[in-house]
Image (cartoon, grey):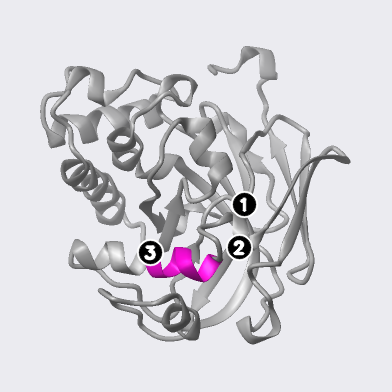
Amino acid sequence: MAVTDAASAARALVEAERERAARGRLTVEWPGLDLGTAYAVQRMTIGDRVRAGDRVIGTKLGLTSAAKQQRMGISSPLTAVLVESYLLRVDQPVPLDELIQPRIEPEIVFVLGRDLEGPGVTAAAALAAVDRVYAGFEIIDSRFEGYDFALPDVVADNGSSAYVVVGGNGVSPSDLDLGLEAVVLSVDGQVVATATGAAVQGHPAEALALAVNALAERGQALRAGEIVFTGGLTDAVPLRHASQVSAEFTTLGALVVTGYSAVADDDRKD
């Protein structure tokens, strides 16, 4: 599919997701794709989901940590949209057969107690709007081969969104030192990464303020009850069949996710 405008870019991404077939960068076929247009593509793909019966439930930040930015060769965070169909129960295996090249990362998750609207929102004001804080996992799944993309590509692709998992026990933000909140990420019992909340823009509240101020530039805001995934604390790791990934937080508790596929890993299209 030739990509020459926002509508054709949206169709190409929807097709790649539906067919579970990674593609090359949009920006190679369409060198003029800029960030403003990429966000327009993102809105088109989310609009298709909503018209089909899905529901917007919040926002996520992507590429907020130094680890993620270094891995992807990108220096700017992004915002993406979370919809209800992304939500998995804590005890629900991740359906890998629906994905292309799944990876998983631990995150600190906010649930807002009141509306939050920019511009000019500070980290302190953003944190004051948070009702509860949760441990979370995001499962990402880029529609670009080998996670090779420029910033407009991944913005158009809604930040490589696939699934999210929110822990069951929320904590009041007043009971946390979010900058020091630590996480240990393990795969099948082996520790693969550690981090603290400071990995996300220096403090997760800074990421929340960044998100709401960026949304304001596009005439959008965050609403009470919405969830915000503040960005991967560590680099994302591949998620495979029967593999058990755990994130143990200092105060937010532990969260465990298992991948499931009816197709052997060697036969997957990744």
The amino acid type of the residue labelled 1 equals: Leu
The amino acid type of the residue labelled 3 equals: Leu
Residue 268 in which image quadrant: top right
Asked whether the viewer can see residue 240, the reply is yes
Q: Which mark is residue 148?
A: none
Q: Is residue 123 left or right of residue 233?
A: left
Q: In front here: 61 or 59?
A: 61
Asked whether the viewer can see residue 88, the reply is no
Residue 131 in which image quadrant: bottom right
Q: Which mark is residue 210?
A: 3
Crowding at mark 3 (Cα within 10 Å: few <14, some 14-19, many 20+): many
Identity of the residue drawn at 14% across and 35% down: 7
Q: Is residue 216 left or right of residue 253?
A: left
Residue 215 percent across, percent down from the top left: 27, 64
CA distance separating discs 3 and 1 = 16 Å
Identity of the residue drawn at 51% across and 60% down: 230
Q: In front here: 15 or 31?
A: 31
Crowding at mark 2 (Cα within 10 Å: few <14, some 14-19, many 20+): many
Q: Which mark is residue 108?
A: 2
Query: In terms of sequence position, does the residue under pointer 2 or pointer 1 come before the other?
Result: 2
Q: Which residue is mark 1?
A: 233
**Quadrant where the image shows the N terminus:** top left
Q: How many marks?
A: 3
Q: Determine if the magenta segment contains residue 206.
A: yes
The amino acid type of the residue labelled 2 equals: Ile
Q: Is residue 173 above or below residue 156?
A: below
Residues in magenta? Answer: 204-209
